Amino acid sequence: MRIFLTGMMGCGKSFWAPRIAATAGLQCIDLDHYIEEKTQQCISDLFETKGESYFRQIENFYLLEIIEKYTHCIIATGGGTPCFHNNMERMKGAGKVIYLKTRLEILAERIANSDRKRPLLKQASTTELIRPLTDIYESRKNCYEKSDHIIDMNHCDETTFAETFLKNYV
């Protein structure tokens, strides 16, 4: 069983994947961390030095490597992963894809309060993030909506999410 968590940056993929994997006895793989280990560079540096096109190529390469190597796992994808190189179809062919749908205002607040660098976002304040997040979301929403399942994260607390996820998807 492979489960791919997808959605916009800040929706909780990297937060939830290890928690659900541990509870379900599955391996957890965070695609961004996997790429950083393999390339010995952080994602923001890869974007800055090589560009988004290069990053999307290696992201695709390592996604396919993970699909080939690991079978019983939860994979936290990058926010753009399913939207490039036919990755959504590959992910769906290899397992279940679950979209963690979260309001943009919540994403902006989380990102503004995070120390993590987001290559596609340079702004720091919550209000400055809404416009670029909206643009990114609009370009990706059709892709995200092709997921096998959509979980509305706007109304989930930690207990509700974990119980729902484990009951319905694992």
Image (cartoon, rainbow, N blue to C red):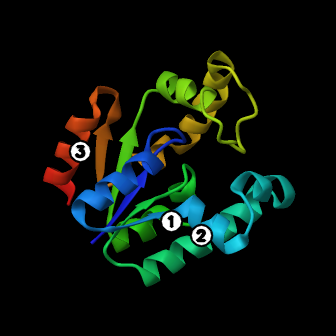
Q: Which residue type carries mark 2?
A: Asn
Lateral position of residue 88 relative to residue 120, left or right: left
The mark nearer the N terminus, 1 or 2, is: 2
Q: Which residue type carries mark 3?
A: Ala
* Mark closer to the observer (3, 2): 3
Farthest bottom residue in view: 69
Give the camera-side residue of 96 and 159. Answer: 159
**In the picture shown, does residue 94 fall above or below 117?**
below
Taking the spot 34% from the left edge, 78% from the top edge, the residue there is 71
- Disc 2 crowd rating (10 Å Cα; few below 14, some 14-19, many 20+) is many
Real-space Cα distance between discs 3 and 1? 26 Å
* Mark closer to the observer (1, 2): 2
Asked which secondary structure carries label 1, the reply is helix
**Which residue lies under the disc numbered 3?**
162
Taking the spot 58% from the left edge, 73% from the top edge, the residue there is 62
The mark nearer the N terminus, 3 or 1, is: 1
Q: Are discs 3 and 2 less than 8 Å apart at CB?
A: no
**Which residue lies under the disc numbered 1?**
87
Q: Are discs 3 and 1 less than 8 Å apart at CB?
A: no
Give the camera-side residue of 40 and 32. Answer: 40
